[in-house]
Amino acid sequence: MMSKKKLNISFLLFLLSFTVFIGSCNDQPTELGYTLLYDTISLNPLNSANQKIITGAGNFLNPQQIFDVGATFIGKYKDAQSITLYRFMESNMPDSLLWLKESDIVSAYLTIYPTRYTFGDTISNLSFKVYEVVKLWSPKTPWDTFFQGGTSSPYFDYSRQLGSYNGQIPMRDTIPPFFVQIDKTLIPKWIKMQHDSTPIWGLALVPDDICNAVHQFSALALQKTTNNPTLTVEYIQNGTAQTLVMNSAWNSSISISAPPPKDEITIQGGLFYRGQLTFDLSIIPQYSTIHQAQLELTLDPSRTIWGNYKPDSLLYGGMFVYEDSSTILVDPNIVYYGYNVTGTNKYIFPRVVSFVEYWARYRTQHKFVLFPSGWNEYFRLDRLTFCGLNDPDPDKRPKLKIIYSTRPKH
């Protein structure tokens, strides 16, 4: 009986102690506690609207290649123009056809597949000519090498036009392929070149000056087996109709346009212009904790040119860390995602915390680079220009908003 009473008394003492402990948790901090509280937690707002932390804005050319990515471009629009080059599988030209002459060939034609994307006037005619490529080229050969500052190229045999096209491409959900007749004399020549192990450099599709649009065409890509360009030869052998199909092996496009002014925040897929912003965040004490950072940009519709698709609602940004300003910025250290605020021209990168924190910790040189989202850097020619640092309307200028706290000093 006595032991049971002791147990009850012990339990009551424990309950009383626990109640006192819980109650003390609700007490106000002591004078010393208040000092520690304000010393360790100090949130500081920082806004580029009233502090010059965005120090530069502009664009740069980021040379890349449109090569076997699933799309190519042909045409001209404003100051932009694109040509397409095809090489074909030489294994499709067997030695057993060395006997083939022009008189044996019924027809030779190129089959290509337009898509719905158009940069420019969708109802204007696409007009281009086909020439043989006669010099070694690679996917990395730039426009300036092909044309060397002129309007014609030593890479193409202009003495013989192999084919041409002039017609409208209907903007339908499913667009049928079209066929370009090719000079029949080319086929026996290529078969003999293949037999003699002479390189065959392919065909170039070069737009005419009357073009008022650049059209996209389906092209070869990894594991893509449909809607790829082909060169078909229909011929007669011993009185019987035969068909030879040469599959494309290289599909490439090169494009050029007048460069945007250096101080414009401009991005353009296909031509590979990227926008960039530079910052001076030295006002943030080193090793500060960054709680929030948001970047806001405003699209300038008066200087933006896009095709017949709506502007992309997504935008990529990349942090590029570099040692000197001459470093070519190709692959970002970190990628950020921005989005268009529906019904406005605003694009928001809601969380660029790591970009700011990297600066606060390491004090390195790095830029924030803007480029089209996903494959749009290869699949679209849209030129997006954003309002700059000196825009007359302060609300349209780039904005960086930061909330940070300093770490304890003791």
Image (spheres, rainbow, N blue to C red):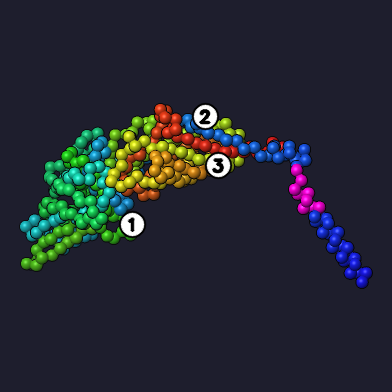
Instruction: Answer with mark 2 or mark 1, whichever residue precedes in sequence.
Output: 2
Residue at 9% x, 67% y is 240
Q: Looking at the figure, which quarter contains the C terminus?
A: top right
Task: Residue under label 3, please give it.
Answer: 292
Instruction: Answer with mark 3 or mark 1, whichever residue precedes in sequence.
Output: 1
Dot 3: element: strand
Quarter of the rendering containing residue 281: top right
Q: Amino acid at mark 1?
A: Leu
Q: Which residues are magenta?
A: 20-28
Instruction: Answer with mark 3 or mark 2, whichever residue precedes in sequence.
Output: 2
Q: Position of residue 145 (x, y in %)?
A: 27, 38
Farthest right residue in view: 2
Dot 2: element: loop
Q: Is residue 79 left or right of residue 406?
A: left
Q: Position of residue 13 (x, y in %)?
A: 86, 59
Circles 2 and 1: CB atoms closer than 8 Å: no
Circles 3 and 1: CB atoms closer than 8 Å: no
Q: Position of residue 360 (x, y in %)?
A: 57, 37
Q: Is residue 352 left or right of residue 74?
A: right
Task: Residue under label 1, please give it.
Answer: 222
Of residue 95 and residue 52, the one placed in the foreground of this image is 52
Residue 50 numbered tag:
2
Q: Is residue 269 visible?
A: yes
Q: Amino acid at mark 3?
A: Gln
Q: Position of residue 146 (x, y in %)?
A: 25, 40
Residue at 18% x, 54% y is 178
Residue at 38% x, 32% y is 264
